[in-house]
Image: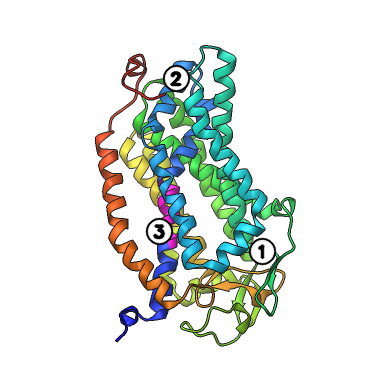
């Protein structure tokens, strides 16, 4: 037996679909509170010392949290080449806006305290806000567009044609998803500040985080409602082999109202995902008001897990539907790398992913503890 045939092609494709979800959720639950803290910075901190408190709650770990975003991009590139090609070319300007905003963050962290000028520091603080708010919004807008279908098609020779524009991405449903993303990560950032900060910063974070948690519940419900009655979903109308070739043009696909909800009728256990989204946000609100710091962060993570899982399970087996030519839609069964490539990558992942998890957990353990104004005055104890 050839080594890579120890795991069949269908199972490998499914494993890599799950791993992609794991990486996205890992980034949202770690890098997500970094983005949330940046979004909250102008509102929870009113003095320079308070802003330094907020910044230093993420100062020790924000760089390490970016590894999940890099791993996610790498997994898409290696495991799902057509997905990488379509999304990174079609969403080019949106990706550029995200990268520009993310670049502002390290520059802001490093430069804001280089001068004593209040205007200088305020300018960089707003740059940090942009670095948190813009990616949070665009990530959600991207998901909203994926749920509606992206205007691309494959020619018979598999050349990709994208016929959308940046401003077309900013449609009402996508913006609703963008607002949900902002609310979700703001809630998560507030949960982190409640846990890691003290004094006025933590108190204000509790207030804004409570509002964000309620907004998550409302926006998530509205997103599901519009998905049911107003946004068409996609359904495969021909036979498709889970072990077939990676050629999306070998199937036919129909656009139908409410199609994204059919998986829940066929597999009732999937309802767990949206329930976790609602319950996690509700419990995060309750824990925040009850001043249960650790539980607030845990419930916020549960909400993020539920919301992201809801999108993945609703769309399965689609990973990027096409509104221009539905049969060009990419699915788990026809958009992956080869059997051998997926197997080799899985072996590497099995070796290194636990190391990354273990190292990340160790870093958080070593750097655990609150950041307060007294500790900020000790210039040797904090980076920013």
Q: Give the label on residue 115, or none.
A: none
- Disc 3 vs disc 1: Cβ atoms closer than 8 Å? no
Q: For numbered disc 1, what is the local secondary structure?
A: loop
Toward the viewer: 338 or 198? Answer: 338
Q: Quadrant of residue 145?
A: bottom right
- Residue tagged by mark 1? 150
Nearer-N-terminus badge (3/1): 3
What residue is shown at x 38% (from left), y 30% (from top)?
57
In reply to whether residue 312 is colored magenta, the answer given is: no
Please identify the quarter of the rendering in which residue 18 is found.
bottom left
Residue at which label 2 appears: 50
Residue 353 x, y percent position in the rendering: 32, 57
Gap between marks 3 and 1, in whole Å?
23 Å
Q: CA distance from mark 3 to mark 2?
A: 34 Å
Mark 1 vs 2, N-terminal side? 2
Q: Quadrant of the N terminus?
A: bottom left
Question: In this orientation, which residue lies closer to the viewer: 231 or 22?
Answer: 22
Residue at image location 41% in from the left, 38% down from the top: 62
Whether residue 226 sits left or right of residue 206 in the image: it is right
Judge from the rendering whether residue 102 lies leftward or rightward of residue 75; answer left or right: right
The boundaries of the magenta stretch are 20-29
What is the secondary structure assignment of the residue under circle 3? helix
Rendered image: mark on residue 22: 3
Tag nearer the camera, 1 or 2: 1
Q: Residues under labels 1 and 2: Cα distance? A: 43 Å
Q: Crowding near pointer 2: few (<14 within 10 Å), some, many (20+)?
A: many
């Amino acid at each position: 037996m050839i080594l890579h045939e120890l795991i069949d092609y269908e199972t490998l494709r499914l494993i890599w679909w799950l791993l992609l979800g794991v990486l996205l959720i890992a980034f949202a639950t770690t890098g997500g509170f970094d983005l949330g803290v940046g979004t909250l910075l102008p509102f929870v901190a009113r003095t320079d010392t308070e802003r330094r408190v907020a910044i230093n709650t993420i100062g020790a770990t924000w760089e390490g949290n970016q590894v999940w975003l890099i791993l996610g991009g790498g997994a898409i590139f290696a495991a799902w080449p057509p997905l990488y090609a379509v999304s990174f070319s079609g969403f080019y300007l949106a990706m550029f806006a995200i990268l520009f905003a993310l670049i502002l963050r390290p520059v802001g962290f490093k430069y804001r305290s280089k001068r004593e000028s209040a205007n200088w520091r305020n300018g960089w603080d707003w740059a940090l806000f942009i670095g948190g708010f813009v990616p949070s919004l665009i990530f959600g807008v991207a998901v909203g567009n994926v749920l509606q279908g992206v205007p691309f098609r494959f020619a018979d020779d598999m050349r990709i044609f994208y016929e959308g524009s940046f401003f077309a991405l900013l449609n009402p449903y996508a913006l609703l998803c963008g607002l949900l993303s902002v609310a979700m990560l703001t809630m998560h950032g507030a949960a982190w500040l409640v846990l890691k900060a003290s004094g006025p910063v933590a108190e204000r974070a509790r207030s804004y985080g409570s509002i964000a948690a309620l907004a998550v519940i409302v926006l998530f419900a509205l997103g599901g409602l519009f998905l049911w009655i107003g946004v068409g979903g996609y359904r495969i109308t021909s036979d498709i082999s889970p072990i077939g070739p990676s050629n999306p043009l070998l199937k036919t696909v129909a656009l139908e109202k409410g199609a994204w909800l059919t998986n829940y009728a066929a597999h009732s256990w999937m309802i767990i995902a949206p329930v976790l989204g609602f319950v996690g946000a509700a419990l995060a609100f309750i824990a925040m008001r009850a001043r249960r710091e650790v539980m607030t962060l845990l419930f916020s993570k549960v909400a993020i897990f539920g919301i992201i899982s809801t999108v993945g399970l609703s769309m399965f087996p689609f990973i990027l539907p096409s509104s221009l030519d539905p049969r060009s839609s990419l699915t788990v069964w026809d958009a992956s790398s080869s059997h051998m490539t997926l197997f080799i990558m899985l072996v590497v992942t099995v070796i290194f992913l636990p190391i990354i998890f273990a190292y990340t957990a160790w870093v958080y353990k070593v750097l655990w503890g609150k950041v307060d104004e007294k500790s900020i005055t000790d210039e040797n104890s904090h980076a920013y």
